[in-house]
Image (cartoon, rainbow, N blue to C red):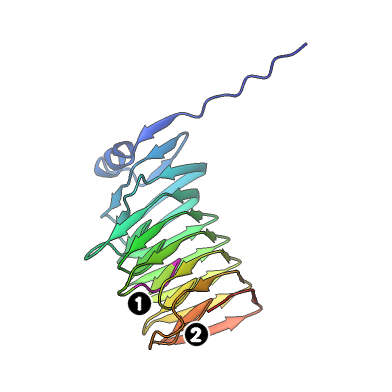
Amino acid sequence: DYEIVEKEIPIKDSSYISSLIDGGSKFIELDCDIKGSFNIDVDDVVIEGNGRTVDLARNGCKITGNNITIKNLTFKNGFGEGYNGEGGAIFNIGALELINCRFMDNHVKEVQAGAIAYFASLTCIDCEFHKNTSRGDCYTKGGAICNKGSLTLKNCILKNNAAEKCGGAIHNEDGLLNIENCTFENNAVNDGFFVVGNGGAISNLGKINCFRSTFTGNEI
């Protein structure tokens, strides 16, 4: 008989990533899960997640650097509330590219964007946004993403995200939103009387280009 022993996945505090960034590392390859949030305030950084997970532990990351790339990483349990709390997982005012990343169970209260809020440039390729929420009485727009800059989504899945006011998956506020070959499924808005425009999947106050994408079961 053989006994199957599951190998325990190592976990490091987020200060591990912060120390590498502060030390000048431009390429960070993870061999462990991460607990806690981190900030990137320098340019030209690549993080290869290797399928690992960042448990944000009810905090969020802030990215202000340009030419930042994050690959193969899951962000979960992010949280933001009130002023400066936008983006439960990531608040981005730099130039960020996400490749094959997952955002799950990230939340904000009384602010925008359960997973990602940004005011600059964001590209998401082969990413998934699942069960992210924006809840509360005020400014609760974009269950997964709030865009106030330039957002490109390619081959992404946005599923089971929810906002209290508008944009169950995405709120595009005076930004440019490019969508190609994406799936929007079972996203929802709870308050159908909000004046801005609702949108079970997407609420739009800017410009949208959408190609070869599917919308199924999104509700107001």
- Can you say whether 207 is above or below 41 in the image? below
Q: Position of residue 26 (x, y in %)?
A: 35, 47
Inspect the magenta stretch and tell me whether residue 141 lies in it. Answer: yes
Whether residue 87 is visible? no
Q: Name the residue at 49% across, 49% down.
A: 74
Which residue, given by chain and number where applicable, does mark 2 sit on? 208
Q: Position of residue 40 (x, y in %)?
A: 29, 53
110 or 89, which is in the foreground? 110
Q: Which residue is more in the foreground, 26 or 153?
A: 153
Residue 175 placement (x, y as % from top left) = 39, 82
- Stretch in magenta: 140-144
Q: Is residue 1 visible?
A: yes
Q: How many marks?
A: 2
Q: In the drawing, what numbered circle is on residue 148?
A: 1
Residue 100, quarter of the rendered image: bottom right
Question: In the image, residue 132 lies at what x, y percent?
Answer: 46, 60
